[in-house]
Image (tube, rainbow, N blue to C red):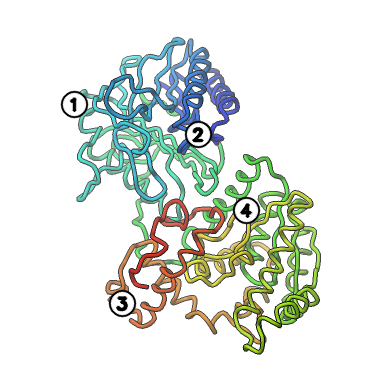
Amino acid sequence: MKIVLAQQNYHIGNFEDNTAKIITAIHKAEAAGADLVVFSELCVCGYPPRDFLEFEDFINKSYAAVDIIKSHTAKIAVLIGAPARNHRREGKDLFNAAWFLYEQQVKYVVHKTLLPTYDIFDEYRYFEPADEWKVIPFKGKRLAVTICEDIWNLGDNPLYRECPMDKLITQQPDVMINLSASPFDYDHDEDRKAIIVANVRKYQLPMIYCNTVGSQTEIVFDGGSLVYDAQGNIVKELPYFVEATDMVDLDNLTGTQPAEIKASVAELVFDHNIDRIYSALVLGIKDYFKKMGFTKAILGSSGGIDSAVVLALACEALGAENVRAILMPSPYSTEHSVNDAVALSENLGNPHDVIRINTIYETFLETLNPYFKDLPFNVAEENTQSRIRGNLLMALSNKFGYILLNTSNKSELSTGYGTLYGDMAGGLSVIGDLYKMQVYALARYINREKEIIPLNIIDKAPSAELRPNQKDSDSLPDYAILDRILYQYIERRQGPREIVALGFDAGLVARALKLVNTNEYKRNQFCPIIRVSSKAFGVGRRVPIVGKYLS
């Protein structure tokens, strides 16, 4: 039996385009002589549809799309993902389902058993879990079909009570097929391979695993669909971050190289999988603009490392001609920062302008002087510069239809080192899930073949340049230490005692964790962040704004 994996990029709620894409892949697979073509989880409507699932019209459109796809299955079988109505009186109204279509009929509908409700996932809000499990007989083979999370319940401390493959294995299947929407983070591809191999070795069956690709606002899906033989050898690995199809012969699933399995890193390694982080961020920008119907971006270019990296990523994603950089020096900006920012844009070939804000800033101070009285210069005057820049960028955005890209990094967002309605403004955060030291690693990766980001930007001490001779180190601990503490607290959910036990100074740990918790109110007003870690700020991390813990 020949099976094609169709790894595709879908648009949530765009049933017309999703359906056309699926049908094109069906015809291609049929022409190649395939018996079955496998797509990814909820491919018909796009993943994650979230509260769209509460609209009856949305479900009707999904069913209509399935009917259209069904008409193209006269000679080839198709496995697609789409919501299915629950016709029983009890339980939620929908199942997350895999539809097996053949001979222009719906032959079988498989319901997802394990519904994740952690991090970015909230499936139990919408779906009823499966309560029956049956293999699908097809052309002399018995297919054990599961959906994404269904294969993740292995190990010493399983999250769920049921394990659907334990039910299906009693029916003597010949192969496991998993329709997945498994998001990217810079450790997850290794975890993914490990869990697939664990399933293969436990059940002694080959695994065909089809993952989606593409970005849905914050969440990036990296593809990398996989085929393993029954011995745990990798047979096929589709490319990452691009659409692809490939075919495997189930009757001849033999591998030659054992799968290399790596464990997730227990501490922050600044350049870990930096090439995939780069690809994820470029795809995140590209898909956000394409799926929203935007074409042009704008950002503030300061001559610092963060804006430099965001500018380089945006030019790669959108084309340099579509990214406008605005340099806005204040009285405290150094000329070398202006020169560095100009050199960066010249290297990239993107349009750039210099708008000096000295006069605007002086006008603000003059207007505020009767109210500020003789109080000493402090963060109020610093933040005024940042908010002037935010206003100028948003004015240009409104006038010319740009989307403002935010340039804050995760270290700054964690500790509140940013100005609301100033440098925290934006429609999309590009590097908000990268710690400062990872941003430096990404800059070096961008320069891997030639100097794109001027070396002076990488080598100089980071500074907001909002007062004379300012350095980030005046307000924050050294990033190389701070980032490791933040990683243990945010990504690994370690408390202060555990972090101190790793060798970090107790006072520094207490200070860092207090900054994180007391600045939740700022992050709650922040724009969507492209997710590349296992715990990004935004929909995947929910903590109280007014909580007292460690504050």
Residue 426 spot, x, y in % from top left: 63, 57
Mark 4 falls on what kind of element?
loop
Instruction: Tell us which disc is closer to us: 3 or 1.
Output: 3
Height in image: 415 above or below 275?
Answer: below
Q: Residues within 10 Å of mark 2 (few under 14, many from 20)?
A: many
Q: Earlier in the sequence, mark 2 or mark 3?
A: 2
Mark 4 → mark 3, Cα distance in angstroms? 37 Å
Q: In the image, which disc is placed on residue 427?
A: 4
- The residue at which mark 2 appears reads as 46
Q: Amino acid at mark 4?
A: Gly
Residue that appears at 28% across and 21% down? 89
Which image quadrant for residue 128?
top left
Image quadrant in which the N terminus is located: top left
Instruction: Tell us which disc is closer to us: 2 or 4.
Output: 4
- The residue at which mark 1 appears reads as 170
35 left or right of 200 in image: right
Q: Residues within 10 Å of mark 3 (few under 14, many from 20)?
A: some
Q: Residues within 10 Å of mark 4 (few under 14, many from 20)?
A: some
Q: Amino acid at mark 3?
A: Val
- The residue at which mark 3 appears reads as 500
